[in-house]
Image (cartoon, rainbow, N blue to C red):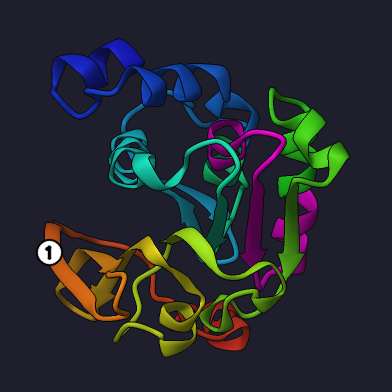
Amino acid sequence: MVEQLKTYGVITSEKVADVIESIDRALFVPDGNVPYYDSPMPIGYNVTISAPHMHATCLQLLEENLQPGMHALDVGSGTGYLTACFALMVGPQGCVVGVEHIPELVSSSIQNIQKGAAAPLLKEGSLSVHVGDGRLGWPEHAPYDAIHVGAAAPEIPQALVDQLKLGGRMVIPVGTIFQELKVIDKNLDGSLSIRDEISVRYVPLTSRDVQLQGV
């Protein structure tokens, strides 16, 4: 899978390649699915795990903000796959928080992480996953060097902007029918630089009740 993503030019960073090879996607994909196929897959509760090329894209966009010792927030952490990748990148001196509003997914994601390379970081506490409304972020460990949002927001949530560190970067899909993966850099003076990276298609960032209705 990694070699294929390298061939297509999706992965150009050796560090990102190493992390994706270290976190086995098969541990995070529901039984009956082909784990290394480059496609999103349903994980229940009207949610999907993103395709490997999207995970690789987000890791590369955030790589400079996932250096050892940095803080990262993963909103809509789902299976816990990307959360675990973040944790390997920032290491034991860093802090990674996953926030997911479906309690069952939080429980299963912790079990997934416990089976793989990020398990020691979960045990030591530098990696944690919580039940919560990701649109509100997780103020306890803010500010964050990196924020990733795994569902499409109709607009950029102010709470997440507020929790982004000066010099930090957020990657978030924004839009309803048409969505763009936006890269948001918080400059040292507090202003934002925003650019569109690629057109994407994500499930909506919404409330737990609306998500479970499939709306």
Tell me, yes or no, whether the highlighted magenta stretch contains residue 93.
Answer: yes
Quarter occupied by the C terminus: bottom left
In the rendered image, residue 24, in percent from the top left (x then y), is placed at 57, 22
Crowdedness near tag 1: few (<14), some (14–19) or many (≥20) residues, C-alpha within 10 Å = some
Q: Residue at x 52, y 81 (%)?
A: 135
Q: Could you tell whether 127 is left or right of 133 in the image?
A: right
Quarter occupied by the N terminus: top left
In the rendered image, residue 67, in percent from the top left (x then y), is placed at 48, 38
Label 1 sits on residue = 196
Q: Amino acid at mark 1?
A: Asp
Residue 57 found in image quarter: top left
Residue 160, compared with residue 158, is above or below; it is: above
Q: Residue at x 64, y 66 (%)?
A: 100
Q: Could you tell whether 212 is left or right of 120 in the image?
A: left
Q: Give the magenta range.
A: 86-108
In the rendered image, residue 190, in percent from the top left (x then y), is placed at 32, 80
